[in-house]
Amino acid sequence: MTSTRFALVSTLVLALPLVACGGPTVVRGEDTPGLDNQALSTSLDNHDLQKMAHENLAVLQNSGVVKRWQTENRPSVAVLPIRNDTTEHIDSALDTLLGDVETQLINWGGVRVVSHENQGALIDEVRQQNSDAFDKSTVARWGQQIGVRYFVTGKVFANDERESDTRRVQYTLFMQVLDAETSEVLFQNKSSVTKALVR
């Protein structure tokens, strides 16, 4: 028996007990109802971010600022990066969320959305400075740089509580709409989710 054949047979023989013992099974979300909704930890996950963003956008859609947009001729809007004020490593999830917010605004049809992909220099500047997009002193300058009338911005933060064997974390996504010319806050809302680990 060649060494390659021997290695293959040995691998199969060693793998059989794992299969027989019911080792882990890989599944898809659409094949396992509720899989995407299950909390695997107290960490902030994509489902939590989507839920909070959906709630904030639902309030925004019925707000005075959207009524204002409807009276204007499709004003330009840009979504700034969502600031992460938690200790979680969720930058890629927040980038995805930024795209989702842009998609929702585009689908409403009343505004022209300046894509964050076309704002490379601005995005780099915001991230480099770790600047808070809520700092009104910089908003007008950003608006002039990329030619937008309104900014949608946000930040996510956490409140972590522990007692004995219990851990509870409340995550909050705070969203604002700012006038790029005046830095006036035209809309703000927050939505929260709570996750807990109880032993």
Image: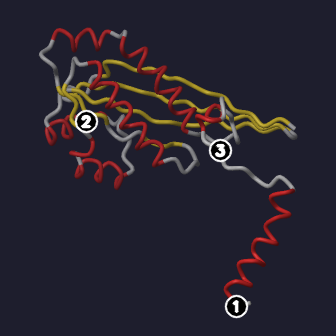
> Which numbered mark, 1 or 3, is in the foreground of this view?
1
Hey, which quadrant is residue 199 in on the image? top right
The crowd level at tag 3 (other Cα within 10 Å; few <14, some 14-19, many 20+) is few
User: Where residue 101 sits in the image (x, y, percent)?
Assistant: 37, 30
User: Is 87 rendered above or below residue 197?
Assistant: below
Residue denoted by label 2: 139
Residue denoted by label 3: 27
User: Where residue 128 sits in the image (x, y, percent)?
Assistant: 34, 55
Which residue occupies the foreground of this view, 55 or 142? 55
Sequence-wise, the earlier of marks 2 and 1 is 1
The residue sitting at 15% across, 42% down in the picture is 145
Residue 2: which numbered mark, if any?
A: 1
Callout 3 amino acid? Val
> Could you give the CA–CA distance between mark 3 and mark 2, rounded to whole angstroms?
45 Å
SS state under label 1: loop
Callout 2 amino acid? Val
Which residue occupies the foreground of this view, 32 or 111? 32
